[in-house]
Image (tube, rainbow, N blue to C red):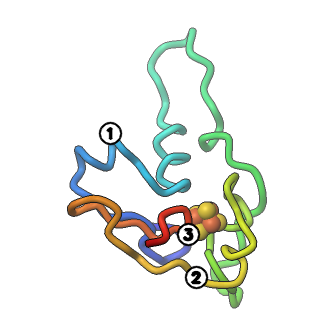
Amino acid sequence: MYLGKLVEVAPAGELYQRPAHPYTQALLASVPVPDPRVKQLEEGGLKGELPSPTADIRGCRFCSRCPHVMPQCQQQEPPMQEIAPRHFAACWLFKA
Ligand code: SF4
């Protein structure tokens, strides 16, 4: 969930093994690794500003921080769609 909207839904095993949405990937990349020799990425290496949750956001809510942002992302909110059996994501990277 990002700014109050579901961005990806899948069975837990599938989600952890094959995260599809860039935000889910960033979240999982930010999980601490209990090994001091492993360099940790802060927030999965996300850059950009978190928009105000009360702002009227046009397009994808994650576009100000997404490393894969495209022009379409800033114009239209991506629909939630099934990208694999029982695996859903709201992202234009997976347009049908
Ligand atoms: S719709 Fe675009 S901005 Fe949003 S997560 Fe997908 S690629 Fe990134």
Measuring from the top left, give residue 77's x and y in whole percent: 58, 82
Quadrant of residue 50 within the rendered picture: bottom right
Disc 2/disc 3 C-alpha distance (Å)? 9 Å
Reading the image, the residue beneath label 2 is 77
Looking at the rendered structure, the kind of residue marked 3 is Trp
What residue does disc 3 label? 92
Query: Which amino acid, mark 2?
Result: Glu
Residue density around tag 2, few if under 14, some if 14–19, many if 20 or more, within 10 Å: some
Q: How many marks?
A: 3
How crowded pointer 1 is (Cα within 10 Å; few <14, some 14-19, many 20+) is rated as few
If the image is split into quadrants, where does the C terminus sit? bottom left
Left or right: 53 as drawn, with respect to 11: right
Q: Is 51 on the left-hand or right-hand side of 19?
A: right
Give the x, y percent position of residue 28: 46, 42
First in residue order: circle 2 vs circle 3: 2
Q: CA distance from mark 3 to mark 1?
A: 21 Å
For this rendering, which residue is in front, 55 or 57?
57
Q: CA distance from mark 2 to mark 1?
A: 26 Å
